Image (tube, rainbow, N blue to C red):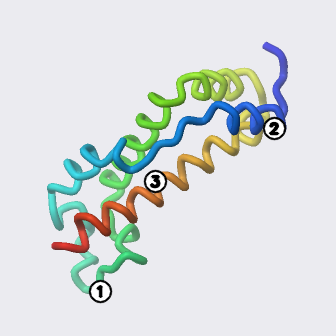
């Protein structure tokens, strides 16, 4: 495999990325949230749970479930990007640095979608 640099990957990502909006993960997110307050650690009860801090009180396995849902949605909508990321990660020592845009997008999507879940579901509890 030819070595890919960050600039080439970023351009490829930008040109090929299909948007993952909240509707893509809404059903899965709401299924996870159906557990109600069980999605939070015990310490949340002593706090004023709000939009800015609720993520801090999610149980780690619940957070990972949300994260997995976002990654699955992104990868399903962007299979070419996933293939490129996997190849770069496997064959290049600097793979994580080169594919940084992919990982940043995953983090941003997770953050945005969790906030939307809060607005639509959790805030109404």
Instruction: Determine the CA span between mark 2 and mark 1.
Output: 42 Å
The residue furthest top is 1
Look at 24% across and 68% down and name the residue there: 122
Is the N terminus in the top left, top right, bottom left or bottom right quadrant?
top right
Secondary element under disc 3, as helix, strand or loop, is helix
Residue 64, percent from left and from top: 38, 49
Q: Nearer the viewer, residue 123 or 43?
A: 123
Rendered position, 12 above or below 2: below
- Relative to 6, 76 lies left or right: left
**Image quadrant assignment for residue 11:** top right
**Image quadrant assignment for residue 60:** bottom left
Q: Mark 3 or 2 closer to N-term?
A: 2
Secondary element under disc 2, as helix, strand or loop, is helix
Look at 46% across and 59% down and name the residue there: 112
Look at 27% across and 77% down and name the residue there: 44
Q: Mark 2 or 1 closer to N-term?
A: 2
User: Which residue is the site of mark 1?
Assistant: 48
User: Which residue is the site of mark 2?
Assistant: 6
Instruction: Determine the CA span between mark 3 and mark 2.
Output: 23 Å
Residue 99, percent from left and from top: 70, 38
User: Which residue is the site of mark 3?
Assistant: 110
Is the C terminus in the top left, top right, bottom left or bottom right quadrant?
bottom left
């Amino acid at each position: 495999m030819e070595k890919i640099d960050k600039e080439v990957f970023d351009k490829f990502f930008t040109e090929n990325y299909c948007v993952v909006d909240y509707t893509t993960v809404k059903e899965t997110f709401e299924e996870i949230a159906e557990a109600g307050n069980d999605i939070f650690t015990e310490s949340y009860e002593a706090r004023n749970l709000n939009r800015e801090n609720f993520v801090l009180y999610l149980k780690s396995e619940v957070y990972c479930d949300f994260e997995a849902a976002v990654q699955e949605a992104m990868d399903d909508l962007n299979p070419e990007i996933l293939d490129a990321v996997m190849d770069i990660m496997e064959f290049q020592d600097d793979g994580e640095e080169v594919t940084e845009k992919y990982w940043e997008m995953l983090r941003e999507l997770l953050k945005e979608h969790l906030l939307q879940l809060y607005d639509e579901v959790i805030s109404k509890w």
